[in-house]
Amino acid sequence: MREDVRDYYGRVLRSSEDLQTNACCDEQPPEWLKPVLGSIHDEVLSRYYGCGLVAPSVLEGARVLDLGCGSGRDCYVLSWLVGEEGHVVGVDMTPEQLAVAERHREYHRKEFGFRHSNVEFRRGYIEQLDELELPDDYFDVVVSNCVINLSPDKEKVLREVHRVLRPGGEFYFSDVYADRRIPEELISDPVLFGECLSGALYWNDFLSLAKTAGFADPRLVEDSPITIENPSISERLSPASFWSATFRLFKLEGLEPSCEDYGQAVVYLGTVDREPGRFTLDAHHVMERGRVFPVCGNTWKMLSETRFAPHFRFIGDFSTHYGIFPGCGELMPFASGTSGEDSPSGCC
């Protein structure tokens, strides 16, 4: 499978125009990012295959690892975001893609006005970061854009990401997910796999793998349905449905399996660049500047024990537990007033 994917992205695809579906097509970038993308070399852009935006906030000076960096588009965008004091490492297994990325390192250094390049590229497999001598507890942020679905060992990818992230670090990535497990005969098809479809994880399997790897509370940032604009491929994959989704996973000790209520709240200070009025942690946590925002214990840790801490005021502590956090989607399984003659029969 690795050889098939390497051949597909190294030799079959010469540009994004050669893709047979729209699964690996980027969403419309926000206005603030367009000038940065406008400074990326045309050859790098032409060999870009992604399904989302992997540019989280508060990256200045950060160490960032890009898994499946390809021709380097996201690496160079991240290079600008982390600034000259930050550092970006891109990993990819396709020599043709890495050759494009390497060819334009000096171009982007000059374009961004840096004294020295803050980007490097390494050839290897994203599930074998240990073989690339990437150290434990090192990176502030790991990103990936529509690549994990192409790995034959997704569980090991997540374990390796957890290993190289520093405590409080974050895995922020976009990928393709399915609403069911894909049959093996479709997974083994090199075109369906290379188009980022048949290798897509069933979303519930992904959540289980993430938790097993040490990411106790995966947070969905955004998602959108994928319409496969190729009738023959769509028919082969039917009735499965696919989504492009961005998740953020934090390497934090003490995260609980559920959202527990300790009476805590946070106040966003409005100090994150490009988010002066409101800060978005995930799809369910959009915090307005200056407003007291109640949070569960897990969300408290995601803000207080990460790079986001200076941008918030924190109210409360963990001294008193009030049960499950209201609205988290979990209910106490014990119904009240079920004793006596009106009690339902059976065990449920």
Image (spheres, rainbow, N blue to C red):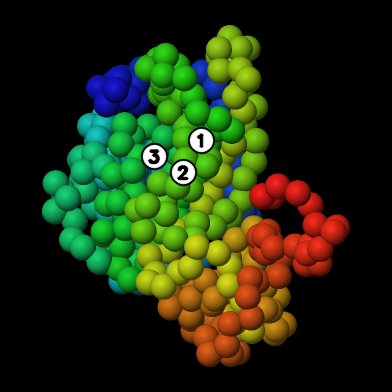
In the image, which disc is placed on residue 148? 3
Task: Say if residue 3 shows up in the picture.
Answer: yes
The answer to which of marks 3 and 2 sits earlier in the sequence is 3
Q: Residue 220, image x and y in percent? A: 57, 53
For the residue marked with disc 1, what is the amino acid?
Tyr
Horizontal arrangement in the rendering, residue 238 relative to residue 345 (left or right):
left
- Looking at the image, is 5 positioned above or below residue 280? above
Residue at left offset 32%, top offset 24% = 5
Nearer to the camera, 227 or 11: 227
| Label pair 1/2, CB-CB below 8 angstroms | yes
Extreme-front residue of the structure: 341
Residue at left offset 58%, top offset 9% = 232
Horizontal arrangement in the rendering, residue 160 relative to residue 293 (left or right):
left
The answer to which of marks 1 and 3 sits earlier in the sequence is 3
Task: Quickly name the residue at label 2.
Answer: 206
**Secondary structure state at the residue bearing disc 2:** helix
Residue at left offset 72%, top offset 82% = 291
Task: Quickly name the residue at label 1.
Answer: 202
